[in-house]
Image (tube, rainbow, N blue to C red):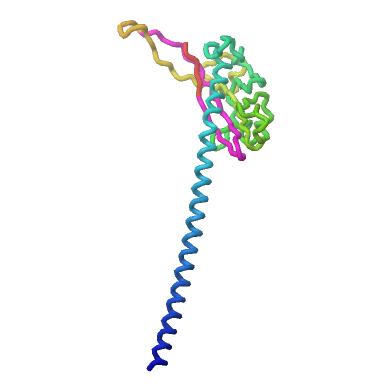
C-alpha cells in the first residue's frame, strides 16, 4: 500500500508540472503581446507629437504668405508680391493654379522632399539656428502660394470668368446703415510642407483672401 501511495503522488506531481509549464507559456505570450501593444502605443504617441509640433511652424508660414500678399498684413506695410498677376518664384508664388495636385490636393512642387528643396523660398524653424540640433531633428517649412485662377488669367486681374472669387458679405457702420458692398477678391491657396524630426512630414493648406 505504501508503494502505491508514493506512485500516485509522483504521478500527481508530473501533472502539476505539466500544467505549470502551460501557464508559463501562456503568461509569456501575454507578456509579449503587452510589450508589442506598449511599443505600438508609444509609436502612435510619438507620431502625434511630431504632427502637433508641425502646427506652429505651419502657422508661421501662413502668416508669412499673408504678409507677402497683402499690404495690411505685412509688418512694414510693403507687400513682397507687388503684382499678383505675375508669377514670382522668389516668393514661391504663382498667379494661376498649377493643376498638378495629387489625390491629397498637394501640388507637385511639394509632393517630394527633392521637389520642395528646389523651391527658392524656405522658412527655417527657430531650431535650425542651434548648432546642437542634429540635422535629422531639424524642422524645415516650405510653402507654395497659388492664385486660384485658370491659365487664362495669366498677367490679368482676377475675374469671375477665370478665378475662384466668392461673393463677400456686405457691411455697414451700424445696423441701420445701408450695406456697403465689398468688391470680390480672388482666393489664394497656401500649401505648406513641414519636414520635422525623425523624417516626419506634414501637409497643411489655408485659403486666403483680401478684405477691404
User: Which residue shows up at 44% across the image and 69% down it?
Assistant: 23
Work out whether 173 lies above or below 21: above
Along the line of sight, the residue nearer the viewer: 49 or 3: 3
Along the line of sight, the residue nearer the viewer: 128 or 110: 128
**Badge count:** 0
| Range covered by the magenta-colored residues | 179-206
The outermost residue toward the front is 2
Q: Position of residue 160 (x, y in %)?
A: 50, 18
Along the line of sight, the residue nearer the viewer: 193 or 27: 27
Q: Position of residue 180 (x, y in %)?
A: 39, 8
Q: Is residue 202 magenta?
A: yes
User: Which residue shows up at 33% across the image and 5% down it?
Assistant: 177
Q: Is residue 204 magenta?
A: yes
The outermost residue toward the left is 176
Work out whether 93 lies above or below 180: below
Q: Position of residue 166 (x, y in %)?
A: 45, 20
Picture quadrant where residue 96 is located: top right
Work out whether 42 lies above or below 208: below
Q: Position of residue 128 (x, y in %)?
A: 64, 29
Image quarter of the N terminus: bottom left
Along the line of sight, the residue nearer the viewer: 134 or 5: 5
Amino acid at each position: 500500500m505504501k508503494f502505491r501511495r508514493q506512485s500516485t503522488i509522483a504521478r500527481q506531481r508530473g501533472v502539476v508540472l505539466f500544467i505549470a509549464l502551460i501557464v508559463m507559456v501562456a503568461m509569456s505570450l501575454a507578456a509579449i503581446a503587452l510589450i508589442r501593444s506598449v511599443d505600438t502605443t508609444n509609436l502612435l504617441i510619438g507620431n502625434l507629437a511630431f504632427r502637433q509640433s508641425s502646427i506652429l511652424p505651419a502657422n508661421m508660414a501662413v502668416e508669412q504668405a499673408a504678409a507677402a500678399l497683402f499690404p495690411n498684413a505685412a509688418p512694414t506695410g510693403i507687400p513682397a508680391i507687388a503684382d499678383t498677376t505675375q508669377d514670382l518664384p522668389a516668393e514661391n508664388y504663382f498667379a494661376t493654379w498649377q493643376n498638378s495636385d495629387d489625390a491629397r490636393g498637394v501640388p507637385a512642387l511639394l509632393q517630394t522632399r527633392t521637389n520642395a528643396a528646389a523651391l527658392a523660398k524656405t522658412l527655417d524653424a527657430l531650431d535650425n539656428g542651434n548648432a546642437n540640433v542634429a540635422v535629422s531633428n531639424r524642422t524645415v517649412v516650405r510653402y507654395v502660394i497659388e492664385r486660384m485662377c485658370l491659365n487664362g488669367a495669366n498677367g490679368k486681374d482676377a475675374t469671375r470668368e477665370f478665378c475662384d472669387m466668392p461673393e463677400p458679405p456686405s457691411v455697414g457702420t451700424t445696423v441701420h446703415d445701408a450695406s456697403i458692398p465689398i468688391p470680390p477678391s480672388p482666393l489664394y491657396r497656401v500649401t505648406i510642407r513641414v519636414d520635422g524630426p525623425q523624417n516626419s512630414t506634414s501637409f497643411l493648406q489655408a485659403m486666403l483672401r483680401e478684405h477691404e
